Image (tube, rainbow, N blue to C red):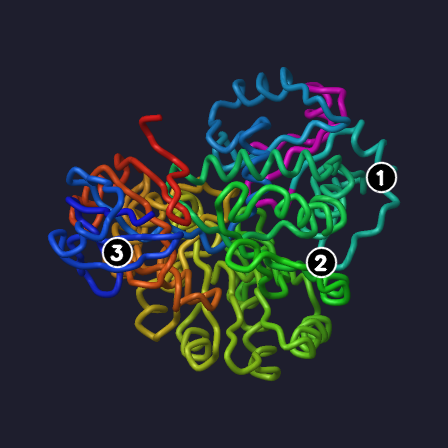
């Protein structure tokens, strides 16, 4: 059946403010664009946009989709800023699983950056409990949880992580990076059916923001990689829930996935690069930085030695693969760029640098000469604004989230949220990109980008990142009939109106998967 879309602003994303009057889609692809009077005679069905705005479906280029589903079902503390309220929520929360998993704790929301110890957590709950920090690189475990895991002061810190200790050498309950990962893994109680439910919950939520594709990293956090992969294949596809995902393969499961060579579903569930971590996050002062954090001698946490990093890169290259690396601090980016320069990405591919939060002029210049793209999270900027200067000092802020400068050097930027770390709504990211404004003011305004460039990060740039520039992210014949329909003209309204904008419909493969009025 041929469906005509007309009577609205239909942005092609091929050039700023480039529009077509109408389009026809058939069998999940755009068949033709042009004038309404020319196309109408070919259509079997019509969709009157009634003055609304249609764009290619949006993509989030870095998130953790299964964890979004879990967040929507669990206790999440991301927006809690009253200490008594936080304690009440934790004390009254009781999951149906062996562990209470509580997400999104952020000490910056509370007076004096309050962080509970395991004894303070004990006063709130006697069930084994892990409270994860908002960055998902740290968390705190209560005494019952430590006992269940057999952890005490004799535990040895893993490479790339540590168990925090007090002045007497006793565990405080706080764990970081590789130590945190080990504890998080120990709390997993998933199966294929539960993960499928998480995926359904998350995708239904993403639909409401016009998101039709996500690049996600889930393969090593929910039991053997086969469980999340099978859950995706059970849940998504052309004859199931219509949503497209690209799956990064974490270093911990990469060898197994290469050896097994599992089947994917073309156009729907596709494999992506090897994912690895080089450092932590600013909030826990574990991002790896060249100059120490203000008032300290601490440079953060280096998760891999130079030799270990090079070994992982060589492994990816031996399998004709790209790498996707978590880098937040400038020292982390330095080390990764060194490795990429030494072991270039295979021809026709590009490496992914995820976050790229703190850079400098020489790093940006070096990156611009490589086949690398940057998955950025614009709302990190607004989340960090209230406190990051006290961690990094004023001088380094010039190259913190320097999106316009990166773009001016020819770097391809993909827009993302790192959800559930940040809210998944792409319009929050686009607003941050074009205004650089958060609750505490405007930050480094000269790094703002144009509206068109911001939306490109979530449409055609995102398609280029996963080698789909020939079929996704544009309104063009032959491209996916994946659309986001907004209640106003998002390309021309005042920037603050983006925060009030609503998605009216989301279409994937020509099928309406979300309608705000149904």
Closer to the chain start, of discs 2 and 3, is 2
Near mark 2 (Cα within 10 A), the count class, few <14, some 14-19 or many ≥20, is some
Magenta part of the chain? 114-138
Report whether 5 appears left or right of 162: left
| Residue 355 in sight from this viewpoint | yes
Instruction: State the residue at coordinates (88%, 37%).
Output: 150
Q: Please, what secondary structure does the residue beneath circle 3 have?
A: helix
Q: Is residue 194 above or below residue 53?
A: above
Q: Quadrant of the C terminus?
A: top left
Determine whether label 3 and label 1 are within 8 Å by CB: no
- Image coords of residue 47 (percent x, y): 24, 40
Instruction: State the residue at coordinates (69%, 25%).
Output: 121
Assess whether residue 137 is covered by the magenta stretch. Answer: yes
Report whether 500 appears left or right of 120: left
Determine the CA span between mark 2 and mark 3: 35 Å
Determine the CA span between mark 3 and mark 1: 47 Å
Residue hosting label 2: 160
| Residue 298 in sight from this viewpoint | no
Pick out the residue farthest to the left: 37
Q: Quadrant of residue 131?
A: top right
Instruction: State the residue at coordinates (44%, 42%).
Output: 424
Label disc, if present, on residue 151 of the rendered structure: 1
Q: Is residue 61 above or below residue 346?
A: above
Q: Please, what secondary structure does the residue beneath circle 1 have?
A: loop
Q: Quadrant of residue 185?
A: top right
Residue hosting label 3: 445
């Amino acid at each position: 059946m041929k469906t005509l879309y007309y009577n609205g602003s239909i942005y092609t994303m091929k050039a700023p403010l480039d529009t077509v009057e109408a389009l026809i889609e058939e069998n999940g692809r755009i068949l033709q664009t042009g004038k309404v009077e020319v196309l109408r005679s070919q259509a079997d069905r019509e969709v009157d946009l009634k003055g609304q705005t249609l764009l290619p479906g949006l993509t989030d280029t870095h998130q953790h989709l299964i964890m979004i589903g879990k967040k929507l079902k669990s206790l999440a503390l991301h927006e809690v800023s009253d200490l008594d309220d936080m304690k009440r929520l934790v004390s009254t929360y009781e999951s149906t699983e062996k562990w209470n998993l509580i997400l999104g704790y952020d000490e910056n929301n509370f007076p004096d950056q309050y962080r509970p110890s395991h004894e303070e957590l004990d006063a709130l709950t006697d069930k084994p409990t892990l409270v994860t920090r908002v960055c998902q690189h740290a968390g705190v475990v209560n005494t019952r949880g430590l006992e269940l895991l057999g952890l005490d002061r004799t535990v040895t810190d893993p490479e790339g992580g540590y168990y925090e200790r007090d002045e007497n050498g006793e565990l405080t309950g706080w764990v970081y990076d590789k130590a945190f990962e080990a504890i998080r893994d120990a709390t997993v109680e998933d199966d294929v059916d539960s993960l499928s439910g998480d995926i359904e919950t998350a995708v239904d939520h993403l639909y409401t923001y016009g998101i039709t594709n996500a690049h996600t990293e889930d393969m090593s956090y929910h039991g053997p990689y086969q469980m999340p992969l099978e859950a995706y294949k059970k849940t998504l596809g052309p004859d199931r829930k219509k949503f497209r995902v690209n799956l990064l393969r974490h270093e911990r499961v990469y060898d197994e996935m290469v050896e097994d060579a599992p089947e994917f579903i073309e156009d729907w569930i596709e494999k992506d690069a090897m994912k690895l971590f080089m450092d932590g996050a600013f909030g826990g002062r574990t991002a790896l930085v060249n100059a120490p954090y203000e008032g300290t001698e601490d440079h953060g946490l280096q998760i891999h030695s130079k030799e270990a990093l090079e070994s992982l890169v060589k492994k990816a290259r031996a399998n004709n693969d790209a790498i996707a690396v978590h880098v937040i601090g400038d020292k982390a980016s330095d080390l990764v760029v060194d490795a990429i320069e030494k072991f270039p990405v295979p021809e026709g591919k590009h490496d992914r640098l995820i976050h790229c939060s703190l850079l400098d002029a020489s790093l940006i210049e070096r990156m611009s000469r490589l086949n690398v793209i940057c998955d950025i999270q614009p709302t990190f900027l607004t989340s960090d604004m209230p406190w990051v200067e006290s961690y990094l000092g004023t001088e380094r802020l010039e190259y913190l989230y320097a999106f316009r400068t990166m773009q001016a050097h020819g770097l391809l930027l993909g827009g993302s949220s790192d959800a559930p770390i940040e809210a998944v709504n792409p319009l929050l990211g686009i607003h941050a990109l074009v205004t650089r404004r958060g609750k505490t003011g405007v930050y480094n305004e000269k790094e703002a980008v144009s509206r068109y460039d911001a939306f490109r990060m979530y449409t055609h740039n995102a398609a280029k990142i996963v080698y789909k520039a020939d079929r996704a992210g544009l309104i063009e014949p032959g491209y996916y009939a994946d659309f986001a329909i907004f209640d106003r003209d998002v390309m021309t309204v005042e920037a603050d109106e983006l925060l009030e904008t609503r998605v009216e419909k989301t279409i994937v493969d020509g099928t309406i998967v979300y309608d705000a009025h149904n």
